[in-house]
Image (tube, helix red, strand yellow):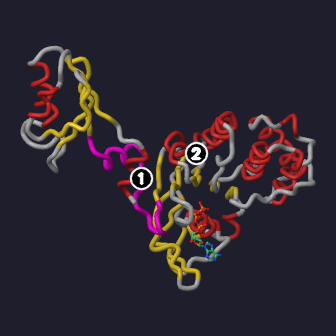
């Protein structure tokens, strides 16, 4: 596991990171979410040792991240770093060699990755001849060529069309399933919502929330139910402890007014509402509404 522990960093008087701590766990896709300028790239660069922190530590399986350890990490930087004039397969294999692979292994890994990323047809084209989306696939291949033990990717999905997102995601998910911790940054909520297992939310250089996506959904976001009954649901407005946020004839969305939510007390509020609804006739739906990442993000920052 990669552990980021109490990292701080300033540029001049500007404190860009302030006590940042979180874990990136094996076998999980961790989304690192924050607005532009929140501190994602700075954190990733410190994790990789490209930049020094003023204080705090980064450890990999309990050990400090040395140059030798870092060699076994895969990194896709924000500023894409491949050579425009070099052929795609040649430069990916060359990067594999730089990471210590034999030339045979570098060549076979390159071929396998280009196949996986649907880029094999372009293997002998110069990078500059590829579309931006395909150049990005090549960047992903470059980060993966040496079978890294950990993957850190800065905005790997930005600028990709939905098909390319699916392709890159499939490749990253496979690595995660093989036990590799994968951290990727994004400022696009919808992308992270779809793709991550764990989530780290950063704002103004401080971590505002982190943990499993589903756990964060439970922890943040107002609990709500969609209630659909057989006739008018107006009676819900008179139910103690209930606030109606939407009312459309037989359909309503409700939330609790009290701090206990729906689940506190001897007889939880949701059970009381359900009983009342059933005593009045047909109940067509009584469904908890899962908060979106957008709601979690707004509440957390
Ligand atoms: N080398 C530097 N010198 C001075 N300020 C810097 C430097 N690098 C980053 N910053 C500042 O640190 C803050 C965080 O930047 P960072 O690039 O880490 O954010 P980010 O979350 O990755 O944003 P983006 O999504 O726009 O890439 C910004 O205010 C940025 O201007």
From the top left corner, tell me how far across and down residue 217 is, in percent.
36, 45
Determine which quarter of the picture holds residue 256. top left
Indicate which disc residue 126 carries: none
**For this rendering, which residue is in front, 84 or 112?**
84
- Under tag 1, what secondary structure? helix
Residue plotted at (47% across, 68% down): 204
**For this rendering, which residue is in front, 149 or 113?**
113
Give the quarter the ligand 1 occupies. bottom right
Q: Which residue is mark 1?
A: 297
Q: Which residue is mark 2?
A: 179
Does residue 259 sit above or below 161 in this rendering? below
The Cα–Cα distance between marks 1 and 2, rounded to whole angstroms, is 28 Å
Residue plotted at (69% across, 58% down): 75
Determine which quarter of the picture holds residue 112. top right
Crowding near the residue tagged with mark 1, few <14, some 14–19, many ≥20 C-alpha atoms within 10 Å = many
- Under tag 2, what secondary structure? loop
From the top left corner, tell me how far across and down residue 71 is, in percent.
72, 62
Instruction: Provide the residue span drawn in magenta.
Output: 202-223
């Amino acid at each position: 596991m990669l552990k980021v522990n109490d990292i701080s960093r300033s540029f001049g008087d500007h404190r860009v990171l302030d006590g940042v701590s979180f874990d990136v766990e094996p076998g999980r896709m961790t989304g690192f979410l924050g607005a532009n300028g929140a501190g994602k790239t700075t954190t990733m660069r410190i994790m990789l040792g490209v930049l020094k922190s003023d204080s705090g530590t980064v450890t990999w399986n309990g050990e400090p991240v040395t140059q030798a350890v870092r060699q076994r990490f895969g990194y896709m930087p924000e500023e894409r770093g491949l050579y425009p004039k070099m052929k795609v397969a040649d430069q990916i294999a060359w990067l594999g060699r730089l990471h210590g692979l034999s030339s045979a292994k570098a060549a076979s890994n390159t071929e396998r990755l280009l196949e996986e990323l649907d880029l094999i047809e372009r293997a002998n084209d110069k990078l500059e001849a590829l579309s931006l989306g395909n150049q990005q696939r090549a960047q992903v291949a470059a980060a993966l060529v040496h079978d890294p033990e950990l993957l850190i990717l800065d905005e790997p999905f930005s600028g990709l069309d939905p098909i390319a997102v699916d392709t890159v995601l499939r490749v990253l998910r496979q690595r995660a399933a093989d036990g590799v911790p994968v951290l990727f940054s994004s400022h696009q909520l919808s992308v992270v919502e779809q793709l991550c297992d764990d989530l780290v939310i950063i704002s103004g250089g401080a971590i505002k929330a982190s943990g499993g996506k589903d756990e964060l959904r439970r922890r943040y976001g107002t609990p709500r139910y969609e209630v659909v009954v057989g006739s008018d649901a107006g009676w819900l407005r008179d139910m103690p402890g209930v606030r109606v946020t939407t009312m459309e004839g037989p359909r309503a969305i409700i939330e609790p007014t009290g701090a206990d939510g729906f689940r506190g007390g001897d007889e939880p509020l949701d059970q009381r509402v359900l009983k009342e609804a059933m005593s009045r006739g047909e109940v067509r739906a009584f469904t908890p509404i899962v908060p979106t990442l957008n709601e979690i993000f707004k509440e957390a920052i």
